[in-house]
Image (cartoon, helix red, strand yellow):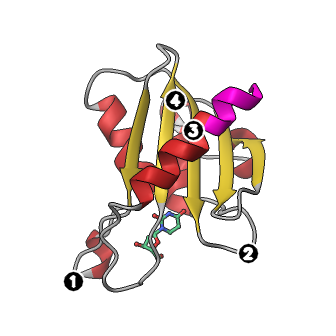
Amino acid sequence: MNKSTLERLVKAAGAARMFAYAPYSGFPVGAAVLTAKGKIYTGCNVEAASSGATCCAERTAIYKAVSEGDTEIVAVCCLADTDEPLAPCGICRQVIMEWGPEIEVVMANTKGETRVMPIGDLLPAAFTRNDLSK
Ligand code: THU
């Protein structure tokens, strides 16, 4: 991924983080999804009093893209105020993997630090749709 695309994604994730609804954890997260069309979909974490109903920022952004028929996901960026660039949780890794092992995951923090890895490396030996086809 080139530098300007990375910067656009990080900026979009940072802006989306401002909308986080995180009254329980106090941990706002922003995300941005880039699709093959060049569109960016943003998301934030949305918590609920029943904590299991919480949706992470990454999934909010992915569900926005997919629900608009834009399923060719190229990259997913997630950003929070963490010491190290934010690594996506296990559930989000599984959901990102649904759209392909080559998807670039841009992990970022509010200090401007980034780390980029393909989802296939972040979720090795993944359970995928291929396992259901037997
Ligand atoms: N969270 C995300 O939105 N993305 C991550 O990658 C890690 C965790 C949210 C879920 C919850 O609202 C809060 O952060 C604390 O776990």
Seen at 42% across and 83% down, the residue is: 26
Pointer 1 and pointer 4: residues touching (CB < 8 Å)?
A: no
Which mark identifies residue 34?
4
Query: Where 101 sits versus 32, above or below?
Result: above
Q: Which residues are magenta?
A: 1-7
SS at circle 4:
strand
Looking at mark 4, is its residue's CB closer than 8 Å to ligand 1? no
Which circle's residue, 2 or 1, is located before the other in the chain? 1
Label 1 environment density (alpha carbons within 10 Å; few <14, some 14–19, many ≥20): few
Which circle's residue, 1 or 4, is located before the other in the chain? 4
Which mark identifies residue 49?
1
Give the alpha-carbon distance from disc 2 to disc 3, as whole Å: 19 Å
Which circle's residue, 2 or 3, is located before the other in the chain? 3
Instruction: Give the residue pinned by disc 2.
Output: 83
The residue type indicated by label 2 comes to Asp
Query: Where 53 sits versus 7, above or below?
Result: below
Looking at mark 3, is its residue's CB closer than 8 Å to ligand 1? no
Label 2 environment density (alpha carbons within 10 Å; few <14, some 14–19, many ≥20): few
Pointer 3 and pointer 1: residues touching (CB < 8 Å)?
A: no
Which circle's residue, 2 or 4, is located before the other in the chain? 4
Query: Where 103 sits versus 37, above or below?
Result: below
Pointer 3 and pointer 4: residues touching (CB < 8 Å)?
A: yes
Q: Is residue 82 left or right of residue 57?
A: right
Give the alpha-carbon distance from disc 2 to disc 1, as whole Å: 27 Å
Q: Quadrant of residue 102?
A: top right
SS at circle 3:
helix
Seen at 43% across and 59% down, the residue is: 17
Q: Nearer the viewer, mark 2 or mark 1?
A: 2
Give the alpha-carbon distance from disc 1 to disc 4, as whole Å: 31 Å
Question: Where's residue 2, x and y in %?
Answer: 75, 25
